[in-house]
Amino acid sequence: MQADLLPDQIIVGVGCGTGTLFLMPKDAQPKAIVKGLDADPQILRLAQKKHGRV
């Protein structure tokens, strides 16, 4: 991770898929706010289930 993330910084990922790579910033800065967007609602449900959000 090359970004210097700050607590409460908002990170939006467009085309996040199932979120595997997208949640890396959250690992680097647990207090960051991470939101993912994807055009496929089935993929978003899979991402939510995969990451314990459903």
Image: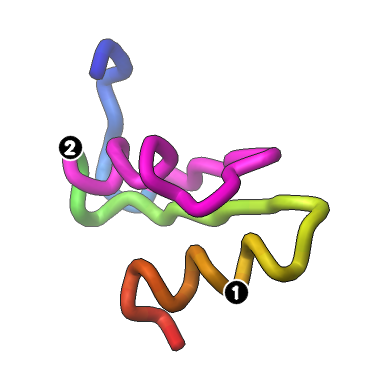
Total marks placed: 2
Magenta-highlighted residues: 9-27
Q: Position of residue 9 (x, y in %)?
A: 41, 44
Q: Nearer the viewer, residue 52 or 33?
A: 52
Residue 35 vertical placement versus 44 (above, below): above
Which amino acid type corresponds to the residue marked 2 in the rendered image?
Answer: Ala
Query: Badge 1: how crowded within 10 Å, few (<14), some, or many (20+)?
Result: some
Q: Position of residue 48 (x, y in %)?
A: 48, 73
The nearer-to-camera label among 2 and 1 is: 1
Q: Residue at x 35, y 46 (%)?
A: 23
Question: In this figure, which residue is indicated by the disc labeled 1?
Answer: 45
Secondary-structure class at tag 2: helix
Q: Quadrant of the N terminus?
A: top left
Which numbered disc, 2 or 1, marks the residue that appears first in the sequence? 2
Name the quadrant containing residue 5. Answer: top left
Residue 47 vertical placement versus 22 (above, below): below
Q: Is residue 39 left or right of residue 21?
A: right
Which amino acid type corresponds to the residue marked 1 in the rendered image?
Answer: Arg
Question: In this figure, which residue is indicated by the disc labeled 2?
Answer: 28
Q: Position of residue 21 (x, y in %)?
A: 38, 36
Task: Give the farthest residue toward the bottom.
Answer: 54
Q: Residue at x 50, y 42 (%)?
A: 11
Q: Position of residue 30 (x, y in %)?
A: 19, 53
